[in-house]
Image (tube, helix red, strand yellow):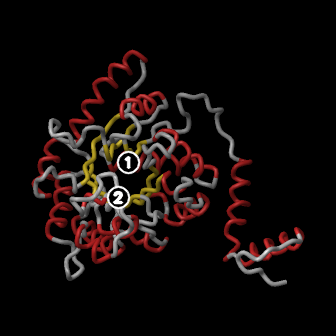
Amino acid sequence: MTVPNAGEAVDDIDEVAELLAEARLRRPNNAPHDRFLTSYKARMLYKSEILRPPAVHGVKDAVDLHCHAHEGQQDALSIAKLASASGMKGLLFKSMPGMNRPELSGPAEAVRAVEGPLRRWADEMEIEPVRLWPGWICTDTRGLPMLEAARAQLATGISAIWLPVFRSANTLSKVGGKAIWFDKDADPTAWSDPLPWEKALEVGNYTLDEHGALKPEYRELFRMAADHDVMISFAHATHREIEAMAEQVRELNITKAVVDHPFSPFLDLSTAQMKELASAGVYLNFTYDEISPLLGVDPAVMCRTIQEIGTDQVTLSSDAGEPLFPNTVEALRLLIAHMRAFGLTEEEIHEVSSVNPSKVLNAV
């Protein structure tokens, strides 16, 4: 039997079924069928407490290293209350409402504005409030040179630094960005197509010089993170950038370096690359974003990868906040539940969701 050309009619329903069966067999490794088998087994065998919203079980003592709550996303105070009621230990905000408003000194002040109401509410509820930490993205400089802005933000008490994210050359070349970032006459609401690499390099942030080494300002940013003992994330770096950053981690004996969402197409790291980063002391921060419908990473593959790397240098985070995702607490519950269902032990779950992220944030 031959497969018909596009648009060619097939009248026999049995012939259609046979053609579909043949097409499934031709798929490389029959991957969707494999995923169906492993996921259904995990779904049927995994048991936990009955869900009783609004509080969420399964996240006790968890620390989320990657929480979003800027304008248009989840409400920071509400998610902090839910995290507290669910027994979580802490939230590191990568983004916060008003963090770029000129009347605020930055994300640390934005977090402090949430901590007061949270404490008062927790006292009324007679529960322990979740700890909150502010993070800072190095491209949010408020018009200052990057290192000057970094010094100012570190002085306010930030707990984490992210290297270029949305405006990195890598991001712009893969998914585009707001056209207004590189065309002052563009529609402020327009999103561009992915940019050619040369254009992305011209208008975006790239951390390497012409010799493939970290530019001096980024080397200094790593030194500042080491001196202040704060987390530093490689963010949306290319493989070449990641290699250079890992060398800096080794050179400075940094113990709080993180690679976020290693399976994301922004990074797309192999297991061998993840092992190499772990050997350099870098934490692999796996996220709900990766197993969400938007990216669709097979959770069984994620779990096997964590088992192969070992849990010493692994953390779990939500990377949630966008309206297309569950809230941060539920996203983290889902990620943890999937890793449990696919084979991580309770001891391993505790290590990657609580112990390791606590080390990163000096909250042990």
Label for residue 258?
2
Decide: is 146 above or below 105: below
Q: Which mark is residue 65?
A: 1
Q: Position of residue 306 (x, y in %)?
A: 52, 61
Q: Identify the image quadrant of residue 190.
A: bottom left
**In-image side of 44 versus 335 (left or right):** right
Residue at 27% x, 35% y is 111
Mark 1 and mark 2 lie on one chain; the one further toward the N terminus is 1
In terms of secondary structure, where does tag 1 sit? strand
Q: Quadrant of the C terminus?
A: top left
Query: Observer-nearest residue: 312 or 166?
Result: 166
In percent of the image, x 32 and y 57: which residue is there? 178
Tell me the CA gap for discs 1 and 2. Answer: 9 Å
**Circle 2 SS class:** strand
Q: Residue 63 appears at what percent x and percent y? A: 41, 42
Which quarter of the rendered picture does the N terminus lie within? bottom right
Horizontal side of residue 184 vs 362, given as left or right: left
